[in-house]
Amino acid sequence: MLADSDIVSVLFRSLVLIGLIVGGFYAVARLRRWLKEDEEVSAGKIGFTLGDLRELHRIGKMTSEEYEKAKNQMLAAGKSMTKGIDPLARPDSSKASRDR
């Protein structure tokens, strides 16, 4: 049979282990929340969009000339990024069958 000191020792170690597990869950939850906040901030505002330009022009913070110039620059940058990519092209079916 276990002595009283053995029972106390087992209970104490069990409580310490439970405390470590609860603390670990709390730390992981805080870390996940912190990482998710960082993702939301970075994903929330990636860059300046045409919608942003339209809004600035609509509320009068941008003249029509500035709006047209900025819009043309953004469209030109977008076209240069997709140069050589045909958005209507179908995927190469022979390549798809080779990948299988």
Image (cartoon, rainbow, N blue to C red):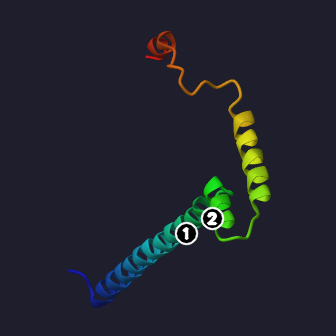
Check the image and report above or below for 88 versus 55.
above
Q: Residue at x 58, y 59 (%)?
A: 43
The reply, left or right, for residue 11 in relation to residue 47 is left
Which badge, 1 or 2, is on the more N-terminal residue? 1
Could you tell me which secondary element the residue under label 1 belongs to? helix
Q: Which residue is mark 2?
A: 55
Q: CA distance from mark 1 to mark 2?
A: 27 Å
Q: Residue at x 33, y 80 (%)?
A: 10
Based on the displayed image, in which of its 4 quarters is residue 78 positioned? top right
Q: Which residue is mark 1?
A: 37
Type of amino acid under label 2: Glu
Where does residue 46 sit, x and y in percent of width and height? 64, 57
Badge 2 crowding class, 10 Å Cα cut-off, few under 14, some 14 to 19, many 20 or more, is few
Q: Residue at x 64, y 59 (%)?
A: 54
Viewer-side residue, 19 vs 10 = 19
Viewer-side residue, 37 vs 60 = 60
Q: Contact (CB < 8 A) between labels 1 and 2?
A: no
Check the image and report above or below for 94 versus 33.
above
Where does residue 57 sit, x and y in percent of width and height? 68, 64
Where does residue 89 sit, x and y in percent of width and height? 54, 20
Q: Residue at x 60, y 24 (%)?
A: 86
